[in-house]
Image (cartoon, coloured by chain):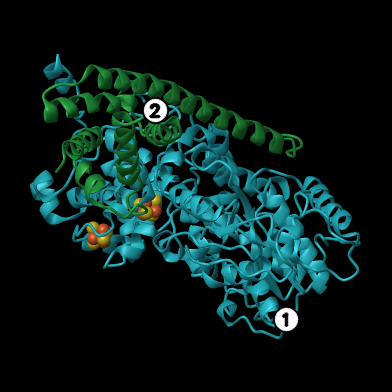
Amino acid sequence: MSAEQAILQRWIERTLKSYPDGMAGFLGEERDPFRNPVGHTLRENLTTLLQELMGTMDQKRVAPALDALVRMRAVQNFSPAEAVRFVFGLRQAVFEVSGAVPDSLATRIDELALMAFDQYMSCREQIFELRAKEIRRRAQYAAFEEGEEP
Amino acid sequence: MQEKLIQIEQEPPRGDWRDPHVEFHKGAMCYSAAAKNLTYLGLPNPRTWQPTDSNWKLPPDWKKIILAGMKERLKKYRSFRLFMDICVRCGACADKCQFYLGSADPKNMPVARAELMRSIYRRYFTLTGRIFGSLAGGRELTEDVIKEWYSYYYQCTECRRCSVYCPYGIDTAEITMMGRELLTLIGCNINWVMEPVANCYRTGNHLGIQPHGFKDSIDFAANEASEITGLKIEAPINRKGAEVLFVMPSADYFATPHYYTLLGYLMLFHQIGLDYTVSAYASEGGNFGFFASHELMKRLNAKIYDEAKRLGVKWILGGECGHMWRVLHQYMDTMNGPADFLEVPVSPFTGTVFENARSTKMVHICEFTADLIHHGKLKLDPSRNDHWRVTYHDSCNPARGMGLLEEPRYILHQVSRRFHEMPENTIREQTFCCGSGAGLGTDENLEVRLRGGFPRANAVRYVKQKHGVNLLTCICAIDKATLPTLLEYWVPGVEVGGVHELVGNALVMTGEKERTTDLRGEPLASAALPASGEMEAVHA
Ligand code: SF4
Ligand code: SF4
């Protein structure tokens, strides 16, 4: 196993640990993307992010991968900090495998964390907008309801 | 420093499932039923409260009521006792629930959801449980258990996906139904179920639309269908002596995108010359009573046969509705039948006898239309749907609840040239629920819906990326109401529509003017594909 693979493995495991007891097994092991959408989303996008962090940080790949992860975690009953904490998990993963985190990588991880916060906020805002939209739609329909019952 | 960070990252202690304590979070729970709705329906313990309150104001003898209610139901419903007894905890159902898959919350495993009730059953209704308590898998019935039931029986859409995989056929949906019935006995209901039920009881439909409002909506749609086609399309209301009573979910005439499906029905009925009527009394196919108790379901369902009798029709045709069909298929005949005043449905155009509807006397619009197409009774121009790349979401109730799998697909293949299935383990009997059924589709519960709908959206995203799918069709009013929000969050760029909306687009009508737009008023894209264009690959 290459160092990068070992880091990825640890990063995925750390992220899985943020889910309730007993969940890591299923989320980590079931490989069918449709039977295990959460595990699949984690694995696929953490892989992309690691490649980019170690590579050229191509925004066209970083942004959608980060979005997929944060979008999912933004509705999974995590506090804001818990939702984006997975980004910092990479620091530990690198440390455990390599014994040190190079400055350049540490900076990129920090950058990524800030992007994750932004993305988290925009997902939460979108949820509120979607709620507001449903309420407005409901109010429109209620206009059909002529005359409340006593 | 590093060590400390690692410490912080330890998994949060979320405890084991036997601990009934739950936290209610705003945005991820349903509001309680308003007292006026319970009062209107004559249901127990109307009061002002919310799940986030520490005191739920239960009746003083709530425990006695629940245990007596359980006892009664264990006797009345054999399936309930069986489901309580026979689970071997093999785990086959565990990872099949979309709420579990989307939330990664172990209490959303179907087997755990059932265990919330089963542990009480063991403790109070089995000998070993009474003696050994928790050693025999029993739990004390406490207020926390009631709160836990409310949380988890309102995080289940009664979709039955889990039951498909259980070797014993245990249907966790039925356990959820029992849970909700028991909660009803002590006034722990959600408003999104009880308000529609109260409205429906009062006016015949969920929104409380009165007869003149109903007539306005239907007339409006008939006018619009006339404008689109240049024909004089009418929609008869309360017409005695019609051959067929047509019943649809009320959303079809007051909500979008349902409304385009209504236009499709009206155009179809006009073209074939169906002798039919709609009814201002049976103006709701949906039945939210089903989401609270058998008794409420029966009360609301009764109006369909009553109205068929009053109007003197021969048989009933039903529109694109989800749980209307589950109620019809599983309960209507025994609950409010026999409908011996009706005739076995026969299509007046093809002579087909709908044997499957011999006892209920009610035919699904997709069965009816597929039969018309099969017999060459409709002229269709699928190129009018070329601006859509279509996939089909099997709505849980028609698919798993009544086995309607082929008819909608047969129709879609005839009315569109760009149809792509989602992956096999997400459709047909294995379909993932929209995550908003059974009364959960309210805005205050959006986060739970987004979690539960994630597996469905994940499969939609796949066909969008692979085939450019931009329309998710379905035959359920709740789907049409809630999937647009779901897709906007998870897969922007995919719209939601009905099967009969696409039928309306493709239907070539006698004497119609040339169509330049679809039923939504969007320009047609017929030029984009060659007239006899090849069908695209059908399977993902
Ligand atoms: S939501 Fe569906 S799959 Fe999940 S427990 Fe309920 S019936 Fe089973
Ligand atoms: S599949 Fe059936 S028997 Fe197995 S755990 Fe689930 S409900 Fe129990």
Q: Secondary structure at mark 2?
A: loop
**Nearer-N-terminus badge (2/1):** 2
Residue flagged by tag 1: what amino acid is it? Gly
Out of B35 and B159, give the one closest to the viewer: B159
Q: Is residue B423 above or below residue B449?
A: below
Residue B3 quadrant: top left
Residue flagged by tag 2: what amino acid is it? His
Q: Which residue is mark 2?
A: B25
Q: Is residue B324 above or below residue A140?
A: below
Q: Secondary structure at mark 1?
A: loop
Residue at (55% x, 65% y) in the render: B328
- For chain B, the rendered hue is cyan
Query: Disc 2 vs disc 1: which is toward the camera?
Result: 1
Disc 1 is attached to a residue of which chain? Answer: B
Distance of mark 2 from mark 1, alpha carbons? Answer: 55 Å
**Residue B42 in sight:** no
Q: Which residue is mark 1?
A: B376
Image spot of residue B63 (x, y percent):
29, 40
Chain coloured green:
A
- Horizontal arrangement in the rendering, residue B342 relative to residue A49 (left or right): right
Image spot of residue B73 (x, y percent):
35, 57
- Horizontal arrangement in the rendering, residue B498 relative to residue B273 (left or right): left
Residue at (64% x, 61% y) in the render: B499
Image spot of residue B133 (x, y percent):
12, 45
